[in-house]
Amino acid sequence: MDQTGKPARWAPPLPVTARWAACFAALLFMQPSYTLLPGSIVADRNSIRKLLDFVSGKRSQYDWQIDAQMMKGTIFLTRWENDPSQHVIDRFYDGYGKSFEKAFLEHGVGLEDSSSHHRIVSYELGGMRWILQFEADGYLVDNDADYGFATDQGTDVSVVALPLSKRVDAVSLNSNQQYEMLEGVKVIRRGSLVSPDSIIEARTRKNGSKSPSGDESTSILVLQDESHV
């Protein structure tokens, strides 16, 4: 029996962290004084879409699961799916959305390798503060004049995937403390700031269809967004 070498070492990824590291890293970077108040709900747009579909009786063709975690008065809704990344293949058709975005949208200089752009919106609804992460498809240049530009382009600031309980505390930290406690997520200041008023969602539907789809209606409701192309 050949016993050279050794098997893989047991190395569980502890402490267990949730998927919100990048979201909080961006929030700390752009709004260091932002505070999560009791009664807040943190989620992504897709989770809200799925929950609204569920309560309206609409069936999904994919299995999905949403975990709810309460942490110091804040509820985190985290979506889990069997296959979080989908690829279009010959036997699977999911519309022309991706091809449309590829043909009509382009990332700016220095951002060519970006796969997507995500934003965070916050507002009061039903006596609770909602913090929603969503993917922004693009923006219109005409609506974005003189909004401002990011500074220190190319500067790297390391921020972290902390355990969820510590990350909730970190959001309330003063700006001179926010980066020393974090590691694991690299924040690169690059590109220009884009006005929220110029953000668009690119949608496709068959010719002759006039009414918005359920997804579009949900976007208008939960994001207070009416900019669809």
Image: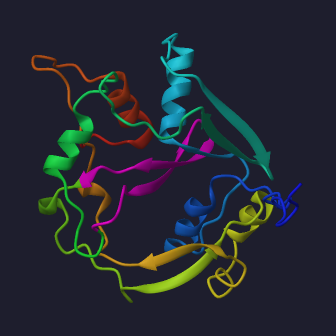
Is residue 193 in view from this perspective? yes
Q: Estimate the x, y position of residue 112 in percent, counting from the top left.
A: 27, 67
Residue occupying the point 49% across, 72% down: 30
Residue occupying the point 22% across, 19% down: 211
Q: Estimate the x, y position of residue 75 in percent, counting from the top left.
A: 71, 44
Question: Picture quarter containing residue 202?
Answer: top left
Residue occupying the point 79% across, 55% down: 16
Q: Estimate the x, y position of residue 63 in percent, counting from the top left.
A: 58, 22
In the rendered view, does 3 fall on the left or right side of 82?
Answer: right
Q: What stretch is highlighted in magenta?
A: 112-138
Residue occupying the point 11% across, 61% down: 142
Residue 184, above or below 198? below
Q: Does the magenta stretch include residue 125?
A: yes
Q: Estimate the x, y position of residue 76 in percent, counting from the top left.
A: 68, 45
Residue 26, above or below 183? above
Q: Which of 59 and 24 is in front in this view?
A: 59
Is residue 229 in view from this perspective? no
Q: Residue placed farthest to the top in the image?
A: 57
Residue 193, above or below 128? below
Q: Which of 22 and 81 is in front in this view?
A: 81
Check the image and tell me how it is coloured.
rainbow
Specify the quadrant that holds the C terminus: top left
Specify the quadrant that holds the N terminus: bottom right
What secondary structure do most residues of the magenta stretch adopt?
A: strand
In the rendered view, does 183 fall on the left or right side of 224?
Answer: right
How many marks can you see? 0
Residue 82, above or below 14? above
Q: Is residue 117 magenta?
A: yes
Q: Residue placed farthest to the front in the image?
A: 1
